[in-house]
Amino acid sequence: MAGEKVHLTGAKETLLMTLYGKALESRLPHSLLGDHFADEAVRKIDYDFSRLKVDENLGIGLAIRAKTLDVRVEDFLARNPGAIVLHLGCGLDTRIFRVDPPPGVDWFDVDYPQVIELRRRLYPSRDRHHLIASSVTEPGWLAEVPRNRPAIVVAEGLTPYLPADEGLRLVSRLVSHLAGGELMFDAYSRFGLTLLRLNPTIKATGAEVHWAIDDPHELELAVPKLRFVEDISAYMPEHAARMGWPAKLFVRLWKHIPALRKVGRLLRYRF
């Protein structure tokens, strides 16, 4: 049977990078993610993944970031039965299958129509899983999301590709619409965006990055309902030990040099 054809460019094409990296990591012994859905999806897609230049080290790094977010989603759902999960710019990520939310949770995956259509062809449906086909920056889609329940909003690999003004408007709409909860996303400093632009994988897609966040408290000033909770390292030393020696060295430097720690990290807020 012919594989699923994909025709994605720019920032949309980067979702194939994250999918492939997680699939590679899931093929390793003692995988952190064990993301069999991602591995199966890669095998079904008719696409030359080699052009993205994703190696095992990048795959492990992407898996660490994903696992860190997964654990915090699981923790939020344990504390808030019947909550909402809002996954922005979901791409082909299989977080809903990895987390396997308990009964009573409504899960919303939001992305461009062509991405959502591809998800429908690749992954099985499940109860209370809602797919919203829209750019996250369009305001209308939020009307489909209940506003009377606690919510955790996750954006992985999304915010750097948004213009800063659109990103701030999106966050403001979210905290105004939802009853309360948490917001988590990966953020990059200005120096971090420079490194992203030089990354061979990003360059292969032609994606452009825009939104830099040097100080997490910037968002509290722009969106007063937000309260900064924590700044989470993008790399955990115990997991990075599985990487090759150049990547291990970078992680060690990352831990001890403040400017490097701001390059890329996970930010968590309450609202």
Image: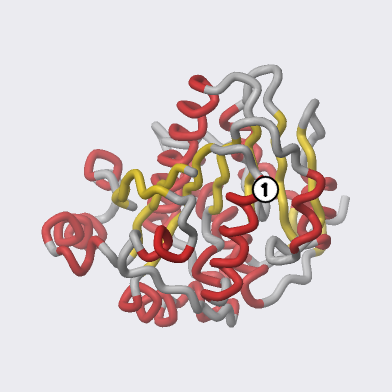
Residue at 45 percent across and 77 percent down: it is 200
Q: Position of residue 39 (x, y in %)?
A: 62, 44
Q: Position of residue 233 (x, y in %)?
A: 29, 50
Residue at 56 percent across and 38 percent down: it is 180
User: Which residue occupies the extreme front position in the image?
Assistant: 224
Q: Nearer the viewer, residue 50 or 154?
A: 154
Lateral position of residue 52 relative to residue 263, left or right: right
Q: Position of residue 104 (x, y in %)?
A: 70, 20
Q: Which residue is mark 1?
A: 177
Q: Amino acid at mark 1?
A: His
Lateral position of residue 257 relative to residue 60, left or right: left
Q: Is residue 201 above or below residue 225?
A: below
Q: Nearer the viewer, residue 53 or 120?
A: 120
Image quadrant in which you'd find residue 40:
top right
Label count reads: 1
Image quadrant in which you'd find residue 263:
bottom left
Q: Position of residue 169 (x, y in %)?
A: 60, 66
Residue at 38 percent across and 67 percent down: it is 188
